[in-house]
Amino acid sequence: MATTRAMRGIKRTAGLCTISTNNDDKLKLYEAVPILKRYIKDPFEPNYVVIRMKPQRIRLMAQAGKGHKDIEMPQQYQMSQSI
């Protein structure tokens, strides 16, 4: 699960994750997200990995005690339940 602050509350994304140590994946993300260069000096550093998430559910959380709203996932992003 990943939690991020959205414009009007908190967004929670839940789904299956995989961890990639593939250098091509690491370099692609490193080049796509320039701020990573502040924290990771070498994109081939063994402690740097790429975490890929296939979202199953996205939930927008309002302020504490105000409830939530589930976001419907487009069909092409929904995962089979037979994993």
Image (cartoon, rainbow, N blue to C red):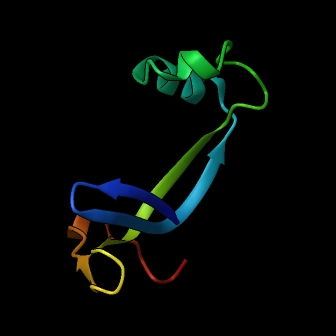
Front in this rendered view, residue 10 or 25: 10
Residue situated in front as seen by the camera: 77 or 69: 69
Point 27% across, 74% down: residue: 62
Left or right relative to 77: residue 21:
right
Please state the horizontal and vertical placement of residue 26, each as a whole percent of the image.
59, 27
Q: Quadrant of residue 71?
A: bottom left
Quarter placement of the C terminus? bottom right
- Which residue is located at x 65 percent, y 24 percent? 23
Above or below 23: residue 14: below
User: Does residue 8 appear to the left or right of 57 in the view shown?
Assistant: left
Picture coordinates of residue 58, whole percent (x, y): 33, 70
Determine whether 6 is above or below 74 in the image: above
- In the rendering, at what x and y percent does residue 56 appear? 40, 71
Q: Nearer the viewer, residue 59 or 19?
A: 59
Residue in the image at 25% along x and 70% along y: 73
Kindly indicate the quadrant of the structure image that contains residue 44.
top right
Observer-nearest of 78 and 68: 68
Say which residue appears at 58% left-offset and 46% top-offset: 51
Q: Position of residue 33 (x, y in %)?
A: 43, 24
